[in-house]
Amino acid sequence: MLNRTVMFAKQHAPESVRVLARRAQLEAHNARLRLTVPVVERSDYVNIYHCAVRKTASQWIKSLLSDPIAYRYSGLLTYDPRFYNWSHPRVCPPNRIALSLFFSRKRFDTTPKPDAHRAFFVYRDPRDLVVSSYFSTKDSHGPMGDVLEVRRNLREKSKKDGLLYLVDHLARKGTFNAVRSWVKAPSSAEVALFRYEDLVGPDQAAQVDRLFRHCGIIVPPTEMATLLDRYSFGRMNDKKGAGAVSHYRKGEAGDWRNHFDEDITEAFNRATGNLLPLLGYDEPAPAPETELRRPATT
């Protein structure tokens, strides 16, 4: 009953109310960390910027970086500029981790930053991004931005037509181009790219440790294991209690194969061009074998 109530409030409370509530939660959380968690090591960086596009485990990464373990070994509190109407001239105050910046690389590069900073960008197979966006927008995502309008469209359509609509919608919003901007940018010591599939895959501990070390956060292996267990997708689903409409749903790499057919694949390839090989996944996606048209037999 409580979980249903929370989900109802999430979907129906005005955005201004939800923003104020989230700001209060963040400030209370940070106050508890300051009072109760001793800082063992401090990061060398004044600010860390978590950059992404939606549906690349941004909430999971936010949970990792907001945990007392991350604070203990960094001395950095988390900050979400959306809860403060983007009022800070440098996106976030000093000694903070700016969370879930859905920026293109151009916008990030033009954002004022301290010299001592680090940033990372997380991307995933854009076919899985489409599928994850479909289920999240249709069923569980909070009603921010254009979510309600897109949700109405998705609920009026079959799954196939909804996926076709969403491919076009994401292309028009610039989601695929935002990913492209990060991957094509010149490499630098300040910015590192991480694949979602690596961060949630079998080598997760080493990959998350690599991400943390890029940010100047050195967590001992035993505490890293505790951190990752605490925020496993299974545990986060149980905590949310959202069942089939969980914001975390599956988190599986390659789930797109269960939903793409030849028409969706063609629309996706047309919308994204060479994005798949640019990201290192594969050539433009062939339709799943079970959906390929078979030649007529005589």
Image (cartoon, rainbow, N blue to C red):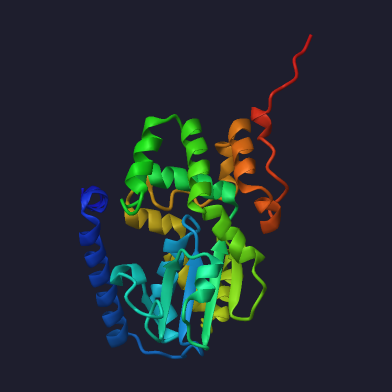
Q: Position of residue 226 (x, y in %)?
A: 46, 72
Image position of 75 with respect to 100: above or below: below
Which image quarter is the C terminus in?
A: top right
Q: Nearer the viewer, residue 41 or 137?
A: 137
Q: Position of residue 247 (x, y in %)?
A: 39, 52
Q: Residue furthest top?
A: 298
Asked whether the viewer can see residue 148, the reply is yes
Q: Nearer the viewer, residue 243 or 125?
A: 125
Image position of 244 with respect to 97: above or below: above
Q: Position of residue 170 (x, y in %)?
A: 50, 48
Asked whether the viewer can see residue 201, the reply is no
Q: How many marks?
A: 0
Image position of 116 with respect to 205: above or below: below
Q: Position of residue 253 (x, y in %)?
A: 58, 51
Image position of 235 with respect to 12: above or below: below
Residue at figure coordinates x 52%, y 54% from the top left: 175
Give the left or right position of residue 248, taking residue 83 as reference: right
Rendered image quadrant of residue 69 = bottom left
Residue at figure coordinates x 62%, y 48% from the top left: 272
Q: Nearer the viewer, residue 62 or 45?
A: 45
Residue at figure coordinates x 55%, y 69% from the top left: 106
Rendered image quadrant of residue 192 = bottom right
Q: Residue furthest right?
A: 298
Residue at figure coordinates x 46%, y 83% from the top left: 47
Give the left or right position of residue 153, taking residue 50 as reference: left
